[in-house]
Amino acid sequence: MSEPFSRFLHPFDVARHPSLEPEVKRALLASWASDRSAVRNKPALRKPPGVKRAVPVDDVFAALRSLDGGAARAT
């Protein structure tokens, strides 16, 4: 995948993807959570290359927690 983020609109799209291995999901979400994906002057938002909309970093962390069976899930 040259731009793996561009396939996903939201972190939960990654977490719920049926054919991605858990390690791949974690790697994608960790990259999404990275400061390199932070929106300039808005550190609470993340927008990886190729993604059309910024999302709250809290959503990224919630998606990561959901991989561990965490209670925080998007509806």
Image (spheres, grey):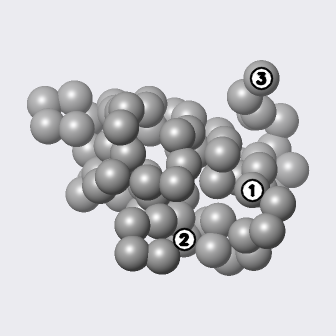
Tell me where residue 64 appears, x and y as whole percent. 65, 52
**Badge 3: few (under 14), some or many (20 or more) residues near its Cα, within 10 Å?**
few
The amino acid on which the numbered mark 2 sits, given as a three-letter code, is Ala
Q: Nearer the viewer, mark 1 or mark 2?
A: 1
Is 34 left or right of 8, judged from the image as shown?
Answer: left
Secondary element at image label 2: helix
Q: Residue at x 13, y 30 (%)?
A: 41
Q: Residue at x 44, y 30 (%)?
A: 56
List the residue tagged with mark 1.
Answer: 17
Q: CA distance from mark 3 to mark 1?
A: 15 Å
Q: Name which quarter of the figure residue 2 lies in.
A: bottom left
Q: CA distance from mark 1 to mark 2?
A: 13 Å
Question: If you read the primary sequence from the N terminus, does the residue marked by circle 2 or circle 3 appear first?
Answer: 2
Q: Which mark is residue 75?
A: 3
Which one is nearer the viewer's eye here, 14 or 30? 14
Is 31 left or right of 25, judged from the image as shown?
Answer: left
